[in-house]
Image (cartoon, rainbow, N blue to C red):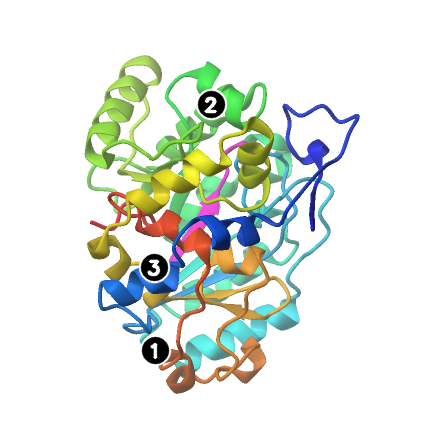
Amino acid sequence: MKSLHAQHHPLADTSYQLTVLNPEQQVGQAWPAFAGKLRETGLLPLRPLGVGTLQLNVGKMCNQTCKHCHVDAGPDRTEIMTRETMELCLQALRQAPGMQVVDVTGGAPEMNPDFRWLVEQVSALGRQLIVRCNLTIIVANRKYHDLPAFYRQHGVRVVSSLPHFSAARTDAQRGEGVFERSIRALQMLNAEGYGQEGSGLVLDLVYNPSGAFLPGNQQALERDFKQRLRREHGIEFNNLLTITNLPVSRFLDYLMESGNYAAYMDKLVQSYNPAAAANVMCRSTLSVGWNGYLYDCDFNQMLELRVDAAAPQHIRDFDLGQLSARSIVLNQHCYGCTAGAGSSCGGATV
């Protein structure tokens, strides 16, 4: 049995606790196993094509509590990556020059007390550095106001969630006043050169659907976002990345409580795309949890599905050869990354 806590969902009645059958068990009974779908399309076993990206979840603490958050992040979370674990990650990067991208996420990664130290160390290694910033952290407290300048100094690629170009839809997903604070943060990033033509400072936005449906066309959405944000707020950015909400954590709670779970799973399964499956991000990414354990992706991390038992389980035991040859751990939520145009931390995959 899995207990879904209504208080984790901002729209839920916090006076009760909803208990349901484990959704993974329900999926197994109602939908074809994802591994079987891969077998049908010649992709099983699913293995890495290489490990080019090291994604680090440096903690689950966040200044927001977003409805769709698969990390279940929030101000009350205390899981934080230590400097010792960060040093093990840096050691792994030195051992693997082919891992050219370091993707730092959270929670709000900036709330980790060693965040700036980590950025400086990765920058010194000459790797491409991505920070997944929720934008509002920049304006949340004076100690974060210099983040845009800090990012510029270290050439950080900033990837930020903005559910919509309207305040109503953004605030409905991420909390009251979030849109206004996000716009202020984007303007501060633009002032440092981010998103400006010729600056070399990349500012990408992330779009997650606000309900139980797949993202629209990424290029069309990017065009709409650019037009509206430029016209109404004078904001420039580089790319819009569309990411499908996976049935994990808070979004799973929403699906179960709203009665949309079965229909959403039907949509994901029916929209399975072999081309998207061939390009899933777990084939090029290794995910490191706040405590140093290794996962195929950030979603598996939240479900505590570690990498295959035959591969090293912790960053202290990093072995690029073994990790490159591992079989990727699969479950039914993987349908989310292979539906339609595909989904990854880098947006659509086909």
Q: Quadrant of residue 234?
A: top left
Q: What stretch is highlighted in magenta?
A: 127-137
Above or below for 42 versus 262: below
**Residue 5 highlighted magenta (yes or no):** no
Camera-nearest label, 2 or 3: 3
The numbered mark, 1 or 2, whose residue comes first in the sequence reads: 1
Above or below for 20 versus 220: below
Q: Mark 1 points at which residue?
A: 97
Q: Quadrant of residue 149?
A: top left
Give how far apart the Cα atoms at labels 1 and 2 are: 39 Å
Above or below for 318 versus 67: below
Q: Residue at x 47, y 78 (%)?
A: 92
**Residue 131 highlighted magenta (yes or no):** yes
Of helix, strand and loop, which one carries label 1? loop
From the viewer's side, name the closer residue of 97 and 293. 293
The image position of residue 337, as x and y in percent, is: 35, 50
Give how far apart the Cα atoms at labels 1 and 3 are: 19 Å
The amino acid pointed to by label 3 is: Met
Of helix, strand and loop, which one carries label 3? helix
Q: Name the residue under label 2.
A: 170
Above or below for 350 versus 139: below
The image position of residue 227, as x and y in percent, is: 24, 20
- The reply to whether the C-beta atoms of the residues labelled 2 and 3 are less than 8 Å apart is no
Sort mark 1 into few (<14), some (14-19) or many (20+) by Cα contacts within 10 Å.
few
Q: Name the residue under label 3.
A: 281
From the viewer's side, name the closer residue of 273 and 263. 263
Q: Residue furthest front?
A: 29
